[in-house]
Amino acid sequence: EIRRLRRKRFLLLCGAVAVFFAISLGVLSRLQAFAILGVAVENETSVPTGKIEALVRGELRGAYGLLIAKQTALLYPKGAIRAALSAAFPEIGSVFFDRRAGRVLGVRVTSRERHALWCGETDGESHAELGRCFFIDAGGFIFAEETSSTTATSTMRFRYYGALAEAPHGTTSPVGARFLPSAAFVELEELRTFLARDLSLEPVALSTVGRDALMHLASGTDLYFSRSEPFDRALANLATLIVSRAGTSTIDRARALDGLEYVDVRFGNRLYYR
């Protein structure tokens, strides 16, 4: 019985301390000395600065549990601001905060890195016809449409085609959706890099069809891969074909597949080409 009473007293004491701490923090959060009086935005994206500032100010309104003010330098909602900005403006990649003189909250936003283009579910009859294309980052996230003022440079001209892993929510625009799960997209990027760096080929586009990947080369040759298994064996077979047709010279290897319509390496150690 004595232990039960001691435990009860201890819990009551802990509760009282917690209430006192919360009330004290609530009072401190509402003191003018700790209030955030302004927001300064450093904007490195194409999103209008006014919209970013308005969203940040909106997230600073109100209180946590009707007690602790959000507009305080002590506990302003960094996580909520980041999440709101990312949801509202997919182009935004990173958000940084700092406290400045005059009780001003500094917010710096940077854009996602333009890595490649997604140009629709199918490439149509010509790989050169882009139509409407959208920038994707290194993780396969679609964040902005390519426009006349944001045309991709030659290093970003690689194009992806295929159904989206995540359908857009409440809109026909793919912005804010994901082309492929991040891990699957990275695998395709590694495949593209290997073909260019190690086999001296020139990939210009890639189409996904179900579990297959169709890599388009600048020479006009198409390479068929299966995404259901690692690419190692397929690449080894492809390398053997290239060496057998051109020898070991880098220049010869770059042209080894010229004139072929396709090379299909989806079937284990078997390889088909025409």
Image: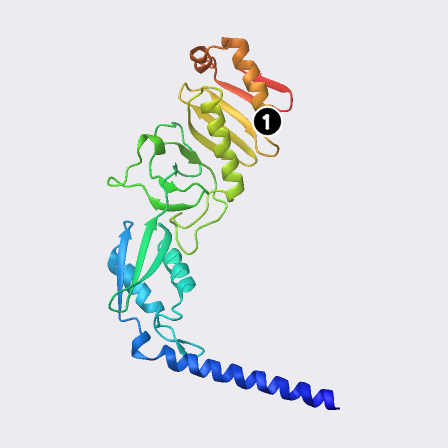
Give the percent coordinates (x, y) of residue 97.
Answer: 35, 59
Q: Which residue is mark 1?
A: 232
* Above/below status of 258 relative to 66: above
Position of residue 197 measured from the top left corner of the image (x, y, whole percent): 46, 23
Residue positioned most to the right: 1
The residue located at (38%, 68%) in the rendering is 76
Question: Horizontally, is 191 left or right of 175 in the view?
Answer: right
Secondary structure type for disc 1: helix
Residue type for callout 1: Asp
Q: Residues within 10 Å of mark 1 (few under 14, many from 20)?
A: few
Q: Residue at x 38, y 62 (%)?
A: 81
Describe the colour scheme in one phrase.
rainbow
Residue found 56% across the figure and 23% down from its top:
235
Identify the residue shown where x is 41% and y is 18%. Answer: 219
Res 47 visible: no
Residue 234 placement: quadrant: top right
Count of picture labels: 1
Q: Nearer the viewer, residue 197 or 21?
A: 21
Q: Above or below — where is 137 with respect to 245?
A: below
Position above or below: 245 against 29: above
Residue 189: image x %, image y %? 47, 34
Q: Does residue 232 appear left or right of residue 132 in this picture?
A: right
Towards the viewer: 270 or 251: 251
Q: Is residue 43 visible?
A: yes
Q: Quadrant of the N terminus?
A: bottom right
Instruction: Decide: is 66 above or below 119.
Output: below
Residue 119, image x, y percentages: 39, 37
